[in-house]
Image: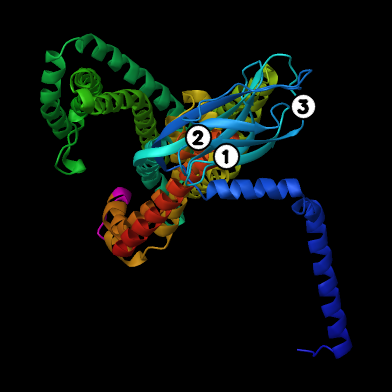
Amino acid sequence: MKKISQPLRSLLVGIFVFTTLVIFAYGFRVTKVNLKETRSEIRQTQLVRIIRALAKPDLIKYDEQETIVKLPYMVPCPEGGYTPPEQDTTKPYLVATPACAEPGSEVTVEGFNFKPNSSGPLFFIPTSEVELRFSNLATDAHGHFTAIGKIPKRSSEEVQHIQAVTRMRVGTPRLSQTAIDTWDKIVETVFMALLATAIGTLLAVPLSFFASRNLMEDVDSPLISIALSLLFVPIGLLGGAVLAQWIDGINQVLSKGWLIPLIGLIAAPFVIAYSVRIAIPQNDAADVKRADLPKRILFGILAGFSLILSLYMLSSLCIAAGNLLAKNLGGLGFLGAFIRDCGDILDMILVVVVALAGAGIMSGFASRLGRTMIKRLPKAPLKVFCMLISAAAGSVLFLLIAAGLDWLYQFENPFWTRTFPAAAGGLLGLATAIVVQPQKYLSIGSVIYFIARTIFNALRSIEALIMVIVFVVWVGIGPFAGVLALSLHTIAALAKLYSEQVESILEGPVEAIRATGANRLQTIVYGVIPQIIPPYISFTMYRWDINVRMSTIIGFAGGGGIGFLLIQNINLLNYRAASVQMLAIAIVVASMDYISSKLRETTV
């Protein structure tokens, strides 16, 4: 390597220093650094006031004994002067010097016979009876104080008053209402994070396998099977959704009482087990008689119908039992509400689950049908059929994409939402079928991998604070919106972490299990999952720690939790109360960090 001469090195150093100077100078300009504001007396006074308020959190409260004493006062002095009325010197009383004054004048107020070592405000009360604070007082050990203040500009021919208010702590200390409210919200915050982590983990675990390159890169399928799947999957989705709604209608009729759902739930496992045994014979596929195929299909349908109906019955029973328990358990009514909500959630997701199951069944059927056609059809008819199916599949795919975009952007132009997508998709599918042979295997796993990774990255790039704004519109202000926002962000974050862990597993155990003839599901269950359980637990605990921290912030946008209370107190300039929430956040975050780190140590 050629050695740089000393003059050139000095020049390069000078250029580097100058460039750095310019960058930081421009940074000061862009960020509008204004040191003059830091020297402002008003801002320094406000800063000191806020720091002192934050240093005195409103944690403890005492009962206070209040003493109020009024002194008649004239503003301005009447003609001939003014002599205040005599006061009872055996009780707390006030003396003002001078006895009357012009607006804006300084007045010295003395108090006698007050409670020793007490304090409070000094008010000027005009004829409007509005308390105008113009000084503070603090009594000595003898109950005496002296305070000086300016009389407000409130002129009147009527008598006005100077009022002293002293407050003295009595009784034992107790938690303030701010501390009690903070405790309630911090508990809410922790459980928001817990629910979000649980929901996110349940969905992130299966989704993470789709974002794992080593599991998806060898997933391939012939072109004709892919085209048939693109045509059959929408049919499976729609058919599954319609089937679920139809079975739900039957359930609504049968679940009007308790007896039929109970009998159905008891009988369902036996019916399903018997139907599955007939539909999936235990002997080899080669020994299965072709004549038994209709019988197997019939019992397979019966097993699926029984399973879906039993789940709907379980949902109805949970809702009914939950409502009953919520009314009769008193303080433990939340257990009944939880059972009811679980039943309601099951009822909501069954349509989606059955629709996805229908799509999966139709996809498997399409794949099997395509492979069968490759084996049995001659090349020329197979090529023609593949071209037709690919053109139709391309049209359907582009029409679905256009329908989604039209829903978002409302083009309201049939040419761009129907005609053009159908034609473009058909031409692209036809061109693909012409170039690619029907029996050629294409890596669809890589496509699924990139789609999954793109979705996860997009969701992770959107902060939960932004997500909660959307969910607040959907479910209203409160912790439920916060849980949904955190759950969505957790799914994306954990799915990425989980998938990267799957990609780093040892390939030896996986290859050994594949060598035994195991299918893909068996390979994942016995070769992948045992290797990823400890890091999955570690990542989950770490995510719970993160969600606790994020839960303290999403309340700023209406997502509930301690953040909602904190932003309220900051907006009201109630910094002593805000200090309590900041202290609670610091304690909880530090505790969660310690607990999660210990749990991660035990799982590694």
Residue sitting at 62 percent across and 18 percent down?
129
Residue sitting at 19 percent across and 32 percent down?
279
Residue 565 shows in this picture: yes
Question: Residue 103 has which mark?
Answer: 3
Pointer 2 local density, CA inside 10 Å: few below 14, some 14–19, many at least 20: many
User: Disc 2 vs disc 1: Cβ atoms closer than 8 Å?
Assistant: yes
Q: Earlier in the sequence, mark 2 or mark 1?
A: 1
Residue sitting at 33 percent across and 64 percent down?
601
Q: CA distance from mark 2 to mark 3?
A: 25 Å
Q: Quick one: 247 or 111, which is closer to the camera?
A: 111
Mark 2 lies on a secondary structure that is strand
Question: Residue 137 has which mark?
Answer: 1
Pointer 3 local density, CA inside 10 Å: few below 14, some 14–19, many at least 20: some
Q: Amino acid at mark 2?
A: Thr
Q: Quick one: 400 or 583, which is closer to the camera?
A: 583
Question: Residue 166 has which mark?
Answer: 2
User: Disc 1 vs disc 3: Cβ atoms closer than 8 Å?
Assistant: no
Q: Amino acid at mark 1?
A: Leu
Q: Is residue 586 above or below residue 107?
A: below
Question: Which residues fall within the magenta stretch?
Answer: 516-521
Q: Is residue 6 above or below residue 541?
A: below
